[in-house]
Amino acid sequence: MEELPGFVALEWREFRYVQVAEAAASSRGWFHDLLDVAETLPLPAEGGCVEERVLVRTPDGLVFAGLSYRGDIEGWRRYVEAIARHRHCVIALIEGNELACSDGRRYRLADCIRWFA
C-alpha cells in the first residue's frame, strides 16, 4: 500500500483518485474534460496536474485513476472537483489505510486491487 501515490502525504503536492470507466483504464479520457471546463473556471494560477499511472479497483468494481497536482493546490482541487461534477464521477483520496470517496463510501486498501499502468 505504501507504494500508492498519496499514501504518504506531501505538503507541496495533493493526490486524488478519479473514477474512470474500466475500459479507459487511465485518467487520460478524464483529463480531456479539462478543456470543456476551462471555459467556466479560471485556470489555477500556477503548477500543474499529472497522471500518476496507477489504477485502483474497489471490491464492488469501481476503477479509480491516480492523479496529483502542485502549485496552486486550492485552484487545482477546485478544477478537479468541477470536472468530477461535469462527468458525474466520484473522487477519492487515501486516508490512512482506506480509500475515502466523495460520495461517502470507504474501502480498505487491502481489499482493493492496485496496478501501475
Image (spheres, helix red, strand yellow):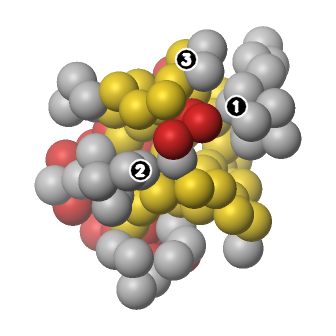
Mark 3 neighbour class, 10 Å CA radius: few under 14, some 14 to 19, many 20 or more:
some
Task: Depth check: give the residue in front, 76 or 103.
Answer: 103
Mark 1 neighbour class, 10 Å CA radius: few under 14, some 14 to 19, many 20 or more:
many
Q: How many marks?
A: 3
Q: Position of residue 104 (x, y in %)?
A: 22, 24
Q: Position of residue 98 (x, y in %)?
A: 51, 24
Rendered view: 10 above or below 44:
above
Q: Position of residue 27 (x, y in %)?
A: 52, 67
| Secondary structure state at the residue bearing disc 1 | loop
Residue pictured at 37% horizontal, 41% vertical: 91
Marks 2 and 1 sit apart, C-alpha to C-alpha, by 17 Å
| Secondary structure state at the residue bearing disc 2 | loop
Task: Depth check: give the residue in front, 61 or 70.
Answer: 61
Marks 3 and 1 sit apart, C-alpha to C-alpha, by 9 Å
**Callout in the foreground (2, 3):** 2
Residue 70 seen in the current view? no
Q: Quadrant of the C terminus?
A: bottom right
Q: Which residue is mark 1?
A: 6
Mark 2 neighbour class, 10 Å CA radius: few under 14, some 14 to 19, many 20 or more:
some
Instruction: Of the two numbered discs 2 and 1 on the same chain, state the one appearing first in sequence.
Output: 1
Q: Quadrant of the N terminus?
A: top right
**Callout in the foreground (2, 1):** 2
Q: What amino acid is at disc 3?
A: Glu
Q: Which residue is mark 3?
A: 95
- Residue contact between numbered discs 2 and 3, judged by CB atoms under 8 Å: no
- Number of the label disc, if any, that sits on residue 103: none
Q: Position of residue 22 (x, y in %)?
A: 39, 76
Q: Which residue is mark 2?
A: 58
Left/right placement of residue 67 relative to residue 64 reads right
Residue pictured at 38% horizontal, 66% vertical: 20
| Secondary structure state at the residue bearing disc 3 | strand
**Callout in the foreground (3, 1):** 3
